[in-house]
């Protein structure tokens, strides 16, 4: 019912309240750790450590911003081309993260899972992943997916290798097989954020980003805050997503 003292024009526009915010799958290409460190005269590994802190902040903020799934690009399969010392530093950090954060994830209702190849990861890290996944499996508030030794092309290829056994061929059944390759979790990305100034997808969630909205930021990942995540989600909610159809105003 209209309030009697307001004309139509004066009715305040509905603010996207947090409680009514869309339930989103957000993917983040967390880039810029190395440059962040180098610009401070620090070793690149210090940038990765600071990046892990940024990840903690974002994971904590995500559920109240309306995010149900958060996929973070922790280590790309392409990163094996980097010096072994840097890759090992990243793997050590990921291991450390799993050991220190699993209890916190349980307390916060976060289900943690890992997508990507596991066969090239150290056995101790593989075990830590399996333990964290099992311990947090029932987390209802946020599905946190860490992409480690991840390549979207590789995941799609793995799904294609399994697909020939599927009898009901459809894009949906292919998505289901891809989900199996990822060991569960939603596949469609709503919002893709990339920090660090580059504007490319770098083999991250190629299938899942088909209709994603992209937000590219100059800011380097260690400087990324909960407020930046909030701003990106607000930017997302201002965009009209037609998925190839006509905008509402034109379609009538
Ligand atoms: C992203 O930061 C983190 C990982 C790849 C693990 P970079 O390490 O790519 O940082 P820049 O792009 O060199 O600054
Ligand atoms: Mg980079």
Image (cartoon, rainbow, N blue to C red):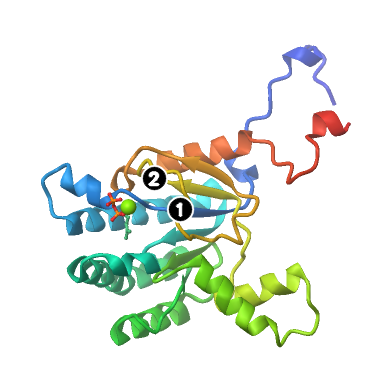
Asked which quadrant contains residue 157, the reply is bottom right
Query: Mark 2: which secondary structure?
Result: loop
Residue 243 in the image: state x and y as whole percent: 73, 46
Mark number displayed over residue 28? 1
- Give how far apart the Cα atoms at labels 1 and 2 are: 8 Å
* Residue closer to the observer: 94 or 43: 43
What quarter of the picture does the C terminus occupy? top right
Say left or right for 31 vs 158. Answer: left
Asked which quadrant contains residue 73, the reply is bottom left
Residue 111 in the image: state x and y as whole percent: 49, 69
Can residue 188 be seen at all in this image of the molecule?
A: yes
Asked whether mark 2 and ligand 1 are closer than 8 Å, the reply comes as no
Mark number displayed over residue 195? 2
Query: Mark 1: which secondary structure?
Result: strand
Q: Are marks 1 and 2 in contact (CB under 8 Å)?
A: yes
What quarter of the picture does the N terminus occupy? top right
How packed mark 2 is, by other alpha carbons closer than 10 Å (few <14, some 14-19, many 20 or more), is: many
How packed mark 1 is, by other alpha carbons closer than 10 Å (few <14, some 14-19, many 20 or more), is: many
* Residue closer to the observer: 35 or 71: 35
Residue with the most extreme left position: 41
The residue that appears at 46% across and 82% down in the rendered structure is 134
Residue 126's place in the image compared with 178, above or below, is: below
The residue that appears at 78% across and 11% down in the rendered structure is 5
The answer to which of marks 1 and 2 sits earlier in the sequence is 1
Can residue 180 be seen at all in this image of the molecule?
A: no
């Amino acid at each position: 019912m209209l309030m009697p003292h307001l004309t139509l024009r004066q009715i305040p526009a509905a603010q996207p309240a947090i409680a009514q915010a869309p339930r989103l799958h957000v993917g983040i290409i967390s880039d810029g750790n190395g440059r962040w460190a180098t610009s401070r005269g620090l070793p690149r590994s210090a940038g990765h450590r600071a990046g892990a802190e940024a990840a903690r902040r974002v994971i904590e903020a995500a559920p109240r911003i309306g995010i149900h799934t958060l996929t973070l690009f922790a280590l790309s399969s392409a990163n094996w081309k980097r010096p072994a010392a840097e890759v090992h530093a990243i793997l050590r950090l990921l291991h450390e993260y799993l050991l220190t954060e699993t209890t916190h994830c349980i307390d916060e209702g976060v289900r943690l899972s890992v997508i990507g190849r596991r066969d090239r990861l150290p056995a101790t890290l593989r075990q830590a992943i399996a333990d964290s996944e099992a311990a947090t499996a029932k987390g209802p508030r946020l599905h946190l997916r860490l992409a480690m030794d991840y390549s979207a092309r590789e995941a799609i290829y793995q799904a294609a290798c399994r697909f020939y056994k599927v009898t009901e061929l459809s894009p949906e059944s292919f998505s289901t097989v891809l989900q199996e390759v990822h060991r569960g979790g939603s596949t469609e990305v709503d919002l893709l954020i990339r920090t660090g100034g580059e504007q490319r997808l770098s083999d991250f969630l190629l299938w899942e980003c088909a209709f994603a909205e992209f937000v590219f930021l100059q800011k380097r990942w260690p400087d990324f805050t909960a407020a930046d995540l909030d701003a990106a989600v607000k930017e997302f909610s201002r965009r009209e997503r037609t998925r190839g159809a006509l905008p509402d105003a034109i379609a009538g």
